[in-house]
Amino acid sequence: MSNFQVRTDLALEARESISETESELRGVRVEEYYREEEDVRVTKVMVDTKNAAKIMGKPVGTYVTMEAPAMVEPDEEYHREISDCLAEELLNMLPGREEEQSVLVVGLGNREVTADALGPQVVDNLFITRHIVREYGKAAYNCDKMNLISALEPGVMAKTGMETAEIVKGVVSATSPDVVIVIDALAARSTKRLNRTIQITNTGIQPGSGVGNHRNALTEESLGVPVIAIGIPTVVDAATIVWDALEKMMEEEQEGDEVNYMSREHLNYPELNNMYMTGKDIDAVVKRVSYTVSEGINQALSTL
């Protein structure tokens, strides 16, 4: 099937999908380390050239992926450790981290669609300071230095009639933040990474790209300020689930002829192209991980 396409927002999965002949892809550097104490595997994919970006289908920039297998579990202590890791990685990516900054946090997504509600729910738990500092000064928080944090939940075009990029550009123009942090739910290639992975990138984001809804990008080029995107995959393409199930079944049966016959090109079911799957407990999971992300952002932005 020539038009079969595995959709993923994770640069790590895009790198893994490259054929073995291109495994030593020029222009892509990969660093990986394991944080044993937190049980978090961190992979940094750095896309350095336009040619590599074209092959991977990801813009030039840095992508940090945190894989936390137990992130779906209701373990508050573990989630606190994940927040600490997120804060550390976010600080490493923030420009001018040692200076006071005005930061706009944008929660993308549709609050009424549970799997897409990560952004709005993260915004609900942020420590917003801009209005207080502007009104009463930093003395209101008994400190001499403080980042000015503001937040925006632009909703979706079906409700507003406006592109997300149009709304964000207007707010950026009016408030002049030094950096924009965008939060969004992502699509994954592997069910093993569903709700267990956090991606941080300095390339910005194209809302809806993981599920085929291409909207105007939120990037440094389009907004005029650095844009950092944070996302968690909450859905996976139905077609890839079918393929993975068939592949696993054939591997267990060890029937080589069938394996050779079956391929992604034969997985031609148009009705699967626009179907995305998520877990049955996605409401509880999104609520839990949104708090984890918000705590990581709060911790990072309160560090001066």
Image (cartoon, rainbow, N blue to C red):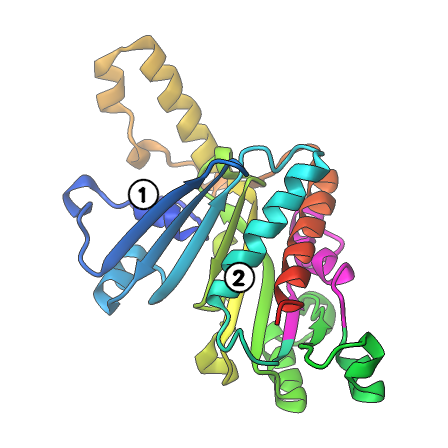
Identify the image quadrant of the C terminus.
Answer: bottom right
Which quadrant would residue 283 be assigned to in this image?
top right
In the rendered image, residue 100, in percent from the top left (x then y), is placed at 61, 81
Identify the image quadrant of the N terminus.
Answer: top left
Amino acid type at circle 1 is: Glu
In the rendered image, residue 68, in percent from the top left (x then y), is placed at 53, 39
Observer-nearest of 154 and 297:
297
Residue depicted at 27% across the width and 66% down the height:
48
**Dot 1: element:** helix
Observer-nearest of 272 and 148:
148
Over which residues does the magenta segment extend? Answer: 104-128
**Residue at numbered disc 2:** 90
In the rendered image, residue 25, in percent from the top left (x then y), is placed at 19, 53
**Residue at numbered disc 1:** 16
Q: Can residue 5 be seen in this view?
A: no
Observer-nearest of 154 and 237:
154
Circle 2 crowding by C-alpha within 10 Å: few under 14, some 14–19, many from 20: many
Q: In this picture, is 236 found above or below 100?
A: above
Residue depicted at 55% across the width and 39% down the height:
196
Q: Is residue 304 visible?
A: yes
In the rendered image, residue 156, in percent from the top left (x then y), is placed at 67, 66
Circle 1 crowding by C-alpha within 10 Å: few under 14, some 14–19, many from 20: few
Tell whether 103 sits left or right of 39: right
Q: In this picture, is 198 found above or below 248?
A: below
Amino acid type at circle 2 is: Leu
**Dot 2: element:** helix
Q: In this picture, is 177 found above or below 93?
A: below
Residues at circles 2 and 1 in contact by the CB criterion of under 8 Å: no
Residue depicted at 73% across the width and 63% down the height:
123
Residue 110's disc number: none
Residue that lies at the very extreme toward the left in this rendered image: 21
